[in-house]
Image (spheres, grey):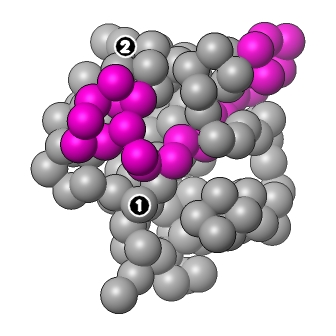
């Protein structure tokens, strides 16, 4: 059974490319573009991994990550934070208890490698 990955990014082109790359690698993928929707979707599908942009409409990704880590049903789900704003990315990842982070733009190989490392 394929691992389920929820990708959250408000940049529609990057979201599409990321979903396509992960799907071609054999994952079952889901996508959304804002912080509230990811909370709703995550509770519905219980993904194996969430790839989460830091800066999102409605609720920022680092805040979403903190909410997810307090949710009994979802706190075990690993999170990879992504952002083009690299100045505080490591700090936001640490503060939100994310499992890893990637700086945008990232190479597809770096994405797949990070996903595989986080999923084990």
In this view, the residue in front, 40 or 118, is 118
Is residue 91 rendered to the left or right of residue 50?
A: right
Residue 91 got which mark? none
Q: Residue furthest front?
A: 72
Which residue occupies 41% across, 60% down?
48
Q: Position of residue 37 (x, y in %)?
A: 24, 32
Question: Is residue 51 part of the magenta span, yes or no?
Answer: no
Q: Position of residue 31 (x, y in %)?
A: 36, 50
Q: Secondary structure at mark 2?
A: loop
Q: Position of residue 6 (x, y in %)?
A: 40, 52
Q: Is residue 80 in view from this perspective?
A: yes
Which residue occupies 65% across, 58% down?
118
Mark 2 lies on residue? 59
Is residue 70 rendered to the left or right of residue 18?
A: left
Q: Position of residue 38 (x, y in %)?
A: 30, 35
| Earlier sequence position, callout 1 versus callout 2 | 1
Considering only vertical position in the picture, is 4 above or below 41? below
Q: Secondary structure at mark 1?
A: loop
Disc 1 from disc 2: Cα separation: 21 Å
Circle 2 residues within 10 Å: few <14, some 14–19, many ≥20 = some
Q: Could you tell me if the residues under marks 1 and 2 are in contact, i.e. CB atoms within 8 Å? A: no
Considering only vertical position in the picture, is 80 above or below 45? above
Residue 48 got which mark? 1
- The span shown in magenta is 68-91
Which residue occupies 85% across, 12% down?
87
Question: Is residue 86 part of the magenta span, yes or no?
Answer: yes
Which residue occupies 63% across, 15% down?
95
The quadrant of the picture occupied by the C terminus is: bottom right
The quadrant of the picture occupied by the N terminus is: bottom left
Q: Quadrant of residue 34?
A: top left
Mark toward the viewer: 1 or 2: 1
């Amino acid at each position: 059974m394929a691992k389920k990955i929820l990708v959250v990014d408000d940049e529609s082109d990057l979201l599409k490319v990321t979903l396509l790359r992960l799907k071609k690698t054999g994952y079952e993928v889901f996508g959304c573009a804002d912080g509230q929707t990811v909370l709703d979707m995550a509770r519905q599908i219980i993904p194996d991994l969430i790839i989460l942009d830091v800066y999102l409409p409605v609720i920022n990704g680092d805040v979403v990550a903190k909410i997810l880590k307090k949710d009994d049903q979802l706190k075990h789900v690993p999170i990879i934070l992504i952002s083009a704003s690299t100045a505080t990315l490591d700090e936001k990842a640490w503060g939100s208890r994310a499992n890893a982070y990637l700086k945008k733009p990232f190479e597809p190989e770096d994405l797949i490698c990070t996903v595989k490392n986080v999923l084990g």
